[in-house]
Image (spheres, rainbow, N blue to C red):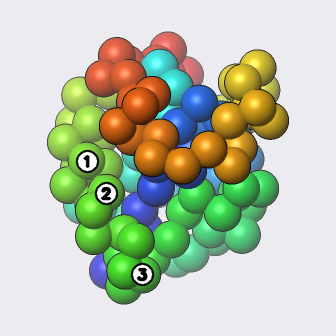
Amino acid sequence: MTYVVLDVCIMCKHTDCVEVCPVDCFYEGENTLVINPDECIDCGVCEPECPIEAIVPDSDERAEEFLEMNREYSEQWPVITTKKDALPTAEEYRDKENKFEKYFSKEPGEGD
């Protein structure tokens, strides 16, 4: 089992979760984070840290759609282990729907 970052994170990119991860399995894109499902040890400490509930276990029905996206981009983007400020658009985009189709960027973030 693993945890998955949903499209809820897109355009928000809160990073509270990365500091608590014991195995450093978060990776940073330009406007979102992903979890490497092969590195995640299913400890669950990241889930309650997300202020917008963008992290769910892969058993959650919403996770299926984003599991492979997390896998694919965690292999391309840099690791992130240090908390940074959320994106300036975080509050404005917090409750927007269908963010993957509308706003997802394939570009990598800066990482640590």
Q: Is residue 52 left or right of residue 40?
A: right
- How far apart marks 2 and 1 lie (CA) works out to 5 Å
- Count residues near mark 3 (Cα–Cα under 10 Å), then give few for <14, some for 14-19, many for 20+: few
Q: Position of residue 59 (x, y in %)?
A: 36, 85
Q: Gap between marks 1 and 3, in whole Å?
A: 15 Å
Confirm whether residue 41 shows in the render: no
Residue identifier under label 1:
69
Amino acid carrying mark 3 in the image = Asp
Give the x, y percent position of residue 33.
48, 39
Which three-letter amino acid code belongs to the residue tagged 1? Met
Residues packed near mark 1 inside 10 Å, few (<14), some (14 to 19) or many (20 plus): some
Q: CA distance from mark 2 to mark 3?
A: 11 Å
Return the x and y of residue 99 as percentages of the image width and height.
Answer: 47, 40
Give the residue number, with chain letter if any, for mark 3: 60
In terms of secondary structure, where does tag 1 sit?
helix
Instruction: In the rendered view, tell whether residue 26 sits above or below residue 46.
Output: above
Helix, strand or loop at label 2? It is: helix
Coordinates of residue 112 in the picture (x, y in percent) = 55, 22
Q: Which residue is mark 2?
A: 66
Q: Mark 1 or mark 3: name the one nearer the start of the chain.
A: 3
Please say if the residues under marks 2 and 3 sit with CB atoms less than 8 Å apart: no
Using the image, determine if residue 61 lies above or below residue 24. Answer: below
Residue 7 makes an appearance in the image: yes
Query: Which residue corresponds to the image point at 41% horizontal and 31% vertical from the top-left?
Result: 102
For the residue marked with disc 2, what is the amino acid? Phe
> The residue tagged with tag 3: helix, strand or loop?
loop
